[in-house]
Amino acid sequence: MKIAASKFVPFLITGALCALGLEGILRVWASASSPVAAVLKIQRESSSQPFLPDSRLGIRPNPEYPGHDSRGFRNALALERADIVVLGDSQTYGSGVEREQA
């Protein structure tokens, strides 16, 4: 049984319009959400990585990474003095959450 190609055209057009619509929604979401925009920016700029190599520490935070202060730590502003310093892993850093939630 031979099916005419014209029967598939509406499905192809509908699929293409759905894909374009979803792409548009994702682009609007990315522009409205700072974490999503930061991730997309990082992927576009391969030089902006969260950590840099360091001769003494092995690695250190990157000051140019979004959400880091000028010294590379996850503060709004670089601190002159800290009463408490916490060292740890992704739980301490607050991976996957905003800086204010960490």
Image (spheres, grey):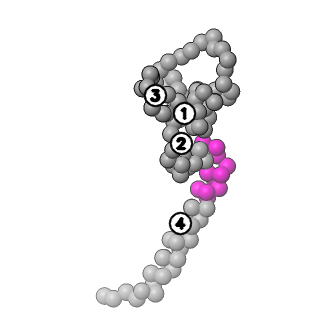
Kindly identify which numbered label has been placed on residue 54.
Answer: 3
- Considering every residue shown, the one lying at the far top of the view is 83
Q: CA distance from mark 3 to mark 2?
A: 16 Å
Q: Are marks 4 and 1 in contact (CB under 8 Å)?
A: no
* Amino acid on which the number 4 mark rests in the picture: Ala
Task: Answer above or below: position of 18 versus 81.
Answer: below
Residue mark closest to the camera, 4 vs 2: 2
Q: Residue at x 67, y 29 (%)?
A: 76
Q: CA distance from mark 3 to mark 1?
A: 10 Å
Q: Which residue is mark 1?
A: 62
Image coords of residue 41 (percent x, y): 57, 48
Q: Is residue 2 left or right of residue 42?
A: left
* Amino acid on which the number 2 mark rests in the picture: Ser
Residue 91 belongs to magenta span: no
- Considering every residue shown, the one lying at the far left of the view is 1
Circle nearer the N terminus (4, 1):
4
Circle nearer the N terminus (4, 2):
4
Q: Which residue is mark 4?
A: 19
Residue 28 belongs to magenta span: yes
Task: Answer above or below: position of 33 versus 87.
Answer: below
Circle nearer the N terminus (3, 2):
2
